[in-house]
Amino acid sequence: MNDDKLIIGGKEFTSRFILGSGKYSIKLIEAAVKDAGAQMVTVAVRRANTTEKENIIDYIPKDVTLIPNTSGARSAEEAVRIARLARELGCGNFVKIEIMKDTKYLLPDNYETIKATEILANEGFVVMPYMYPDLNVARTLKDAGAATIMPLGAPIGSNCGLATKTFIQILIDEIDLPVIVDAGIGKPSQACEAMEMGAAAIMANTALATAGDLTLMASAFKDAINAGRKAYLAGLGRVLTRGASASDPLTGFLRN
Amino acid sequence: MENNYFIDSEFLSKEALERKHRLENDPSSRTNHMEYMEGMEKIDSDICSKVISQMDSYDYSKYTCRDVMAALEHETCTIEDFKALLSPAAEPFLEKMAEKARLETSKHFGNTVYIFTPLYIANYCENYCVYCGFNCYNHIRRMKLNMEQIEHEMKVIAESGMEEILILTGESRAQSDVKYIGEACKLARKYFRLVGLEVYPVNTDEYKYLHECGADYVTVFQETYDREKYEKLHLMGHKRVWPYRFDAQERALMGGMRGVAFSALLGLSDFRKDALASALHVYYLQRKYPHAEMSLSCPRLRPIINNDKIDPLDVHETQLCQVLCAYRIFLPFVGITVSSRESAKFRNGIVKIAATKVSAGVSTGIGDHESKYEGKESDKVGDEQFEIEDSRSLKSMYNDITDEGLQPVLNDYLYV
């Protein structure tokens, strides 16, 4: 278990919880880092574009990897511009691509995401694309140079859990990149479920941001993610889908 | 129950008074409010007919508590559910509506509340809108800031920490032309992260130009969606043309603006129908332009200079709260702005339920930010459009929002 590391863009992480960027506060970052053990925190570049005294970037501990995201981008072109701006701001080489042309559901645009991934990977970025879980798109993203695949579990902020479970499982089975479930995870049990399936990490934000007790919820996520990871590594036992198996097996006659 | 809007200024000439009275009393002296004036662009759109047919057929008296309870239970709020939530039958369920609204707000916006401030740069107006302090027959101190004065105002505001600004003018193309507004936008880009506009409606190519100058949000208040009533309130000027105003947001989006804001001025006509139409205007336009950001305001009528008797009639705080909760439940993803026309108490309460944006450090006058922000007196200022109720500064608004357990946000925007 101690050797179990998540490697993205050549960097090693022991934590498999990543803090998302939707709803932000200084307290949330503290809870995510201290209590949930996050080693990666995403920051919306548009939220860092402020002269406000409380600029989020200043509150992120130095040993935490900053992942700027391109939220607000409506096309590949805009995402590329935001990513370059993030690099100029000193946010490093990591970038999470978020391209939404829909303000109602905030669902990612896979086509534009592929285009942006290709451009930014060529420019040396460690590209983490947020995407709708489609196997063909995931393969294309990998070929375009993505460092991870980040399929959504459910619409962002919905706390619906793994609405796309079947399709995420296909990505985990078929894509040789870390698959990080992003968006929709509302409860620790859902995070645990995704980890049991073989997800490499979980990204969450709303579930923590809107919890009654932030620090307690953060540590609950940490425990759940660890439990799920251990179960995955241990190899899940048989699952009986319908009641118990017959005590007198149908093929019992073969034993005689 | 009606407001008495008509006030005669002693400074008007005999001819002007005669013309004013004729406009007020003789409908045949007024132009056709459904007919476009010269130079007004017509676009091909079916949004208006969709909104109007829903509004015209809306009979809110037929909804019962059963419809309201069903609406509150549904996972997605349909148009029919929304109509029930706006009806009088929903009033006893206000607390339940507020609970549901708060849940939706927190899912989509977390604890954040955005803060902005308006900047009026001119109050010249060519319209006679009977309820508005800037109307051309109202005797007020008129003023138009030059670029130097605008920059000075912006500096004062920016120094207070504000990052989002909404530039407003009275509706006069002659006094405040598109070029003038564009230059103001270019200046604003130097001092602010986000520049919004609330000016007279313009054509698509003009919105495109203003976007290139740095503006990215356009607010146009329809005032009332009731065309008959609109005709009786907007007696003269280009603002009289109802359909050109209705399509303003769509033209703004066609011109490349990122977001658009909508509103009816509650108290002018039947507020339930106006609230329905405002929300459906957003709803249908969002379906056609899914990438656009949309927001709703919910202003009520206020007293104006020279007429302190104007009030929002049957739209009390309870009804306003009902409308805002219904908006949030029906359109969980849209921004909701609550104006400084409302009291600090109301605004503090509503940001916990449905509102996501409030103004602070507000003046609806012209060129008076230094006197208001720093206590420096100046006699060269233009009069205000309406009386504000909540005069909190950015600092006290910021602190109050924090004290309510919410997170004030000054900006989360990039011009790309």
Image (tube, coloured by chain):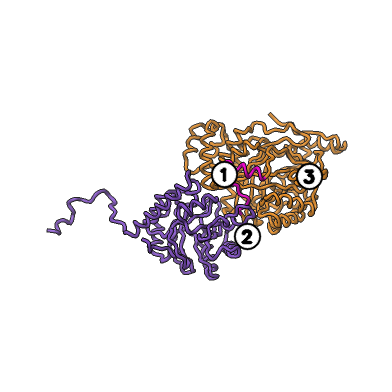
Q: Give the side of residue A229 with respect to residue B171, left or right.
A: left
**Foreground: disc 1 or disc 3:** 3
Discs 1, 2: same chain: yes
| Residue at 69% over, 59% down | B212
The quarter of the picture where the N terminus of chain B appears is top right
Indicate which disc residue B282 carries: none
User: In this orientation, does residue B352 appear?
Assistant: yes
Chain containing the residue with disc 2: B
Chain containing the residue with disc 3: B
The residue indicated by pointer 3 is B376
Q: Amino acid at mark 3?
A: Lys
Local SS, label 2: loop
Reply yes or no: does residue B397 show up in magenta.
yes
The residue indicated by pointer 1 is B406
Q: What residue range appears in magenta?
A: B394-412
Q: Amino acid at mark 1?
A: Leu
The disc, 1 or 3, on the residue closer to the chain's N-terminal end is 3
Q: Position of residue B398 (x, y in %)?
A: 63, 45
Tint of chain B: orange
The residue indicated by pointer 2 is B416
Reply yes or no: does residue A237 show up in magenta.
no
Quadrant in which residue B265 is drawn: top right
Relative vertical location of residue A81 with respect to residue B63 in this rendering, above or below: below
Q: Nearer the viewer, residue A102 or A188?
A: A188
User: In this orientation, does residue B235 appear?
Assistant: no
**Foreground: disc 2 or disc 3:** 3
Tint of chain A: purple
Relative vertical location of residue B10 with respect to residue B149 in this rendering, above or below: above
Relative vertical location of residue B287 with respect to residue B234 in this rendering, above or below: below
